Image: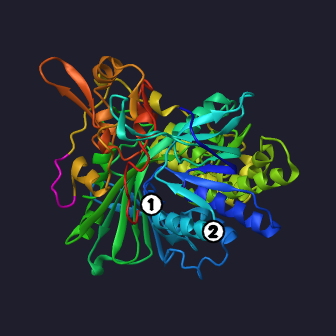
């Protein structure tokens, strides 16, 4: 059956901050010039913001450029940072880093504690008010190509397909969206972005991308324990010194607190469970009291790009571009990437508009140049060695080096340190279980610490059960023969949603995949030691439905 198709000048895959900023900037340019170029945004979540998860403390620099009057338009940036603290934790205490030792670029002055999901919803409403077409609940499942190999657009996935591949009564064929330029703004480890990067060899000459997993909970706490605008970042306990990561605690409005924990996915111990490290983190004496009489409201998890400057791939290819976290622009020491994601979306929109006006090439090579001349590039260049230093030299010496490196860049002496550290591939970092120390995590108490299934419930995750599994295995023997036998089944621990279970029902161990639990964090696709798991898009509208995250 031939699919129906729609034609646009620009199609944007992903309705997060990068994709929406790109759509808004493109429409602004069209309106200013009196042109009627067309564009649309595809979003696999049930609504804009449904799949958006971040800390988040946001730098408004990109929003200031995109919508200068955002305050008058009631953008949900209501809580400026008023108190910025950095703690080094031991098991039973903390050491506060004095402000005068903190590199100025880590300051949160002028930043806001926000729900990035709510900011995305607001951006979506601004885009729709401008007349931009947004299609939530439709997952782009296939990249389309012209005969010459350039990208033609994307196709949405078929709806109403049963687990066995047959068509249910609700079956609806996917639709093709053709465009002169297709922007991929899928977020971290996007399924189509992976294909594009491989097909056009966009990582040639680049370091591998590295990642962390961020696990976040939203709590409503007692008013006497709440201080709107208070921001705390921590490092150290409960992680070992050879593992990169740390925690955060952001006081929002309405007596709400976002607390979370990030573990670098370059960790080596297969017994480590990022979810359980997060639960243990909340029991620290400096944090535990905050949860007395409090209520947990929501839960979620998402992978984070941590490779920085040296891991950003080539951004353009014939027929399109990578924007936002599909490429990876997170400033790891600042723990911020939304401002960079938004700006790259805006840059791509500007170059596409210029190309359409000039009837230019189908490859936006000027986008790469615009990025390298932008403040995004500068933002990443001065912190490029921070994350790999900690991975190579451990938490103590790596942090000392990272701080020194950032101070040198701050005072204009970065040219004295021109080198750029390399990265290891996350999935190659695990050691065999026989060489690792087992980690015994305490049982959840149901008050401050919780299990995975009750947590997933708070993410409002839902997938139609009668559909093909979107967590595909290249070889069904590998999970047991290699992952379980050599690495003690790490997918059962690195997944924060209880998707992967190893069962022994008397006929030998087997892997069970509970795909309906998946919160779309992409950790399995990244950390699987054999790269046997391939995450593909499920039916549109499935996955988490994060409120206020």
Check disc 1: other Cα within 10 Å, few if <14, some if 14-19, many if 20+. many
Q: Secondary structure at mark 1?
A: loop
Q: Residue 450: percent from the left, percent from the top?
A: 21, 53
Residue at image coords 28%, 81%: 224
Depth check, mark 1 against mark 2: the one in front is: 2
In the image, 125 versus 288, the foreground residue is 125
Q: How far apart are the two marked residues, 1 and 2, measured between alpha carbons? A: 17 Å
In the image, 519 versus 279, the foreground residue is 519
**Residues in magenta, as a range:** 442-448
Residue receiving disc 2: 63
In the image, 491 versus 101, the foreground residue is 491
**In the image, residue 447 lies in the stretch drawn in magenta:** yes
Q: Residue 45: percent from the left, percent from the top?
A: 45, 53
Numbered tag placed on residue 55 in the rendering: 1
Q: How many marks?
A: 2
**Relative height, residue 412 to residue 257 (above, below):** above
Is 439 on the left-hand or right-hand side of 98?
left
Q: Residue 494: percent from the left, percent from the top?
A: 34, 38
In the image, 536 versus 138, the foreground residue is 138
Residue at image coords 33%, 45%: 463
**Relative height, residue 31 to residue 342 (above, below):** below
Res 1 seen here:
yes
Q: Which comes sooner in the sequence, label 1 or label 2?
A: 1
């Amino acid at each position: 059956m031939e699919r129906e198709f729609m034609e646009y000048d620009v199609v944007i895959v992903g309705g997060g901050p990068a994709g929406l900023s790109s759509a808004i900037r493109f429409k602004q340019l069209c309106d200013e010039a009196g042109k009627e170029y067309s564009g649309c945004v595809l979003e696999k979540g049930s609504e804009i913001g449904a799949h958006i998860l971040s800390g988040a403390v946001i730098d408004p620099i990109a929003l200031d450029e995109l919508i200068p009057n955002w305050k008058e338009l009631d953008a949900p940036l209501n809580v400026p940072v008023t108190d910025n603290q950095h703690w080094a934790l031991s098991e039973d205490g903390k050491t506060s880093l004095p402000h005068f030792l903190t590199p100025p670029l880590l300051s949160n002055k002028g930043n806001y504690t926000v729900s990035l999901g709510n900011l995305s919803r607001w951006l979506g409403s601004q885009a729709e008010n401008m007349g931009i077409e947004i299609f939530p609940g439709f997952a782009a499942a296939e990249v389309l190509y012209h005969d010459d190999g350039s990208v033609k657009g994307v196709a949405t996935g078929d709806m109403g397909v049963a687990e066995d591949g047959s068509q249910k009564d609700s079956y609806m064929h996917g639709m093709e969206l053709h465009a002169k330029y297709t922007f991929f703004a899928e977020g971290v480890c996007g399924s189509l972005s992976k294909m594009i990067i491989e097909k056009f060899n966009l990582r040639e000459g680049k370091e591998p991308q590295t990642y962390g997993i961020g696990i976040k909970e939203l709590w409503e706490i007692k008013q006497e324990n709440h201080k709107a605008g208070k921001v705390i970042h921590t490092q150290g306990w409960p992680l070992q010194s050879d593992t990169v990561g740390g925690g955060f605690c952001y006081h929002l409005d309405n007596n709400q607190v976002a607390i979370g924990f990030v573990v670098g996915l370059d960790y080596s111990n297969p017994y480590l469970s990022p979810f359980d490290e997060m639960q243990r983190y909340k029991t620290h004496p400096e944090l535990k009291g905050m949860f007395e009489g409090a209520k947990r409201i929501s839960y979620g998890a998402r992978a984070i790009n941590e490779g920085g400057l040296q891991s950003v791939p080539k951004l353009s290819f014939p027929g399109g571009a990578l924007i936002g976290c599909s490429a990876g622009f997170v400033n790891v020491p600042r723990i911020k990437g939304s401002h960079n994601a938004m700006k790259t979306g805006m840059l791509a929109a500007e170059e596409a508009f210029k190309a359409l006006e000039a009837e230019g090439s189908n490859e936006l090579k000027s986008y790469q140049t615009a990025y390298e001349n932008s403040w995004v590039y500068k933002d990443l260049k001065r912190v490029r060695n921070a994350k790999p230093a900690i991975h190579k030299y451990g938490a103590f010496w790596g942090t000392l080096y990272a701080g020194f490196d950032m101070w040198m860049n701050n005072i204009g002496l970065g040219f004295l340190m021109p080198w750029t550290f390399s990265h290891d591939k996350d999935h190659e970092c695990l050691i065999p279980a026989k060489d690792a120390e087992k980690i015994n995590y305490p049982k959840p108490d149901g008050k401050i610490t919780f299990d995975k299934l009750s947590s997933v419930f708070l993410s409002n995750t839902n997938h139609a059960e009668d559909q093909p599994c979107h967590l595909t295995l290249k070889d069904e023997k590998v999970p047991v023969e290699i992952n379980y036998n050599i690495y003690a089944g790490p997918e059962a621990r690195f997944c924060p949603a209880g998707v992967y279970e190893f069962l022994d029902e008397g006929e030998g161990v087997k892997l069970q995949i509970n795909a309906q639990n998946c919160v779309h964090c992409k950790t399995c696709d990244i950390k699987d030691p054999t790269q046997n798991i391939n995450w593909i898009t499920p039916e549109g509208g499935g996955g988490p439905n994060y409120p206020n995250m």
